[in-house]
Image (cartoon, rainbow, N blue to C red):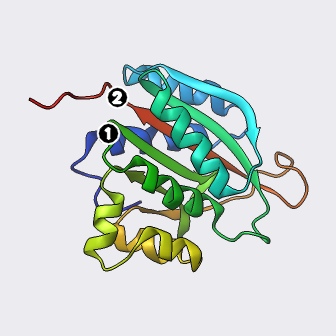
């Protein structure tokens, strides 16, 4: 699920918490809190279902995470994937611009119910995503305007691969559920 994850324990932690929670759209809160607790974190699950377009939701989530107490934060979102293909990836790429220079923040945005079919299920971005995009010859704003979030996140190494099984009866008709996790660690002070 991503090619750069083995060396970064924060990314691995966020991915493990996602995998624990995303397999059950009804018990996701309990599963997330249990998984986070096993890793020494407190998980705050925000009750509101995000239905704003992914670009607006990215701003809301990134700002909330930047102002929140350290720990794991979680939101659910529901988007029409016919109207907006790859909304989890769009949110992640849009949020990555706001995470630049914020090394204490990581954000994962992905579908509920991952399975191993090889397709994209979301992305995990951090303060260096835009720098990795630039090194690959991409620009987040340009890629967002062109709706090329999948290619951009793949170039940055931040795309999550797997697949989805539809958790039937969970999302409103025509919608798909997504899970957004944000990790905020204590800010480090430069010497």
Q: Could you tell me if residue 26 is visible in this image?
A: no
Residue 10 numbered mark, or none? 1
Q: Dot 2 corresponds to which residue?
A: 185
Residue at left 52%, top 42%? Answer: 62
Instruction: Give left or right: position of 16 versus 52.
Output: left
Query: For this rendering, which residue is in front, 183 or 100?
Result: 100
Q: Position of residue 91 (x, y in %)?
A: 58, 56
Q: Earlier in the sequence, mark 1 or mark 2?
A: 1
Q: Position of residue 57 (x, y in %)?
A: 65, 48
Residue at left 14%, top 32%? Answer: 190
Q: Position of residue 43 (x, y in %)?
A: 52, 24
The reply to whether dot 1 and dot 2 touch (C-beta < 8 Å) is yes
Quarter occupied by residue 188: top left
Q: Is residue 175 above or below residue 40?
A: below
Query: For this rendering, which residue is in front, 125 or 23?
Result: 125
Q: CA distance from mark 1 to mark 2?
A: 9 Å
Report crowding for label 2: few under 14, some 14 to 19, many 20 or more residues within 10 A (C-alpha).
some
Instruction: Give left or right: position of 169 versus 43.
Output: right
Q: Is residue 60 above or below residue 167?
A: above
Q: Residue furthest left?
A: 191
Disc 2 on helix, strand or loop?
Answer: loop
Query: For this rendering, which residue is in front, 111 or 27?
Result: 111
Front disc: 1 or 2: 2
Instruction: Give left or right: position of 190 versus 187.
Output: left
Q: Position of residue 181 (x, y in %)?
A: 53, 40
């Amino acid at each position: 699920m991503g090619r750069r994850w083995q060396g970064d324990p924060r990314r691995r932690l966020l991915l493990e918490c996602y995998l624990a929670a995303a397999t059950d759209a009804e018990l996701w809160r309990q599963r997330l809190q249990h998984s986070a607790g096993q890793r020494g974190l407190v998980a705050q699950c925000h009750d509101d279902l995000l239905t704003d377009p992914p670009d607006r939701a990215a701003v809301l989530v990134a700002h909330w995470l930047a102002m929140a107490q350290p720990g794991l934060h979680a939101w659910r979102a529901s988007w029409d994937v016919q109207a907006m293909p790859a909304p989890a990836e769009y949110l992640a790429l849009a949020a990555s611009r706001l995470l630049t220079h914020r090394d204490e923040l990581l954000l994962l945005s992905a579908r509920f119910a991952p399975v191993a079919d090889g397709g994209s299920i979301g992305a995990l971005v951090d303060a260096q995503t835009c720098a990795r995009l630039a090194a690959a010859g991409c620009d987040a704003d340009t890629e967002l305007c062109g709706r090329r979030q999948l290619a951009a996140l793949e170039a940055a190494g931040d795309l999550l691969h797997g697949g989805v099984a539809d958790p039937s009866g969970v999302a409103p008709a025509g919608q798909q559920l997504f899970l957004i996790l944000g990790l905020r660690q204590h800010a480090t002070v430069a010497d």
